[in-house]
Amino acid sequence: MKNVRNLFCAALLASLAAACGSTNGGEGNGTWWKNNLRGYWYVIKRDATDVYRGVDRHFFNYDWDDPNLE
């Protein structure tokens, strides 16, 4: 039963990946995925930096824009 479930999950993931790759129009699959993941990691990095600076500002009273800190 466990093997059937694993096979079903693998087939489902493969079909989803194929469906996502086929919706990209004229670009090749590699180009679309590369551009999509590049934007995804940029957003993750930007949001993590915002959270880090927000914690510094609200909990530690640190101002990142203060010119006297350098």
Image (cartoon, grey):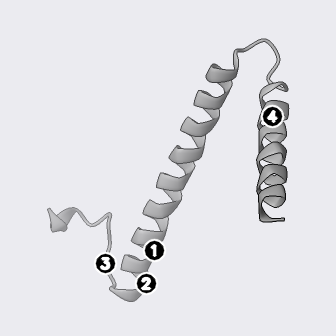
Say what secondary structure mark 4 lies in: helix
Q: Quadrant of residue 49?
A: bottom left
Q: Residues within 10 Å of mark 1 (few under 14, many from 20)?
A: some
- Taking the spot 78% from the left edge, 12% from the top edge, the residue there is 26
Q: Which mark lies nearer to you, 4 or 1?
A: 4
* Label located before the other in sequence (4 or 1): 4
CA distance for labels 4 and 1: 35 Å
What residue does disc 2 label? 58
- Taking the spot 77% from the left edge, 37% from the top edge, the residue there is 17
- Taking the spot 64% from the left edge, 35% from the top edge, the residue there is 36
Q: Which mark lies nearer to you, 1 or 3?
A: 1
* Label located before the other in sequence (3 or 4): 4
Are dots 1 and 2 in contact, CB under 8 Å? yes
Q: Amino acid at mark 4?
A: Cys
Between 45 and 18, the one nearer to me in the picture: 18
Q: Which mark is residue 70?
A: none
CA distance for labels 1 and 2: 6 Å
Q: Which mark is residue 20?
A: 4
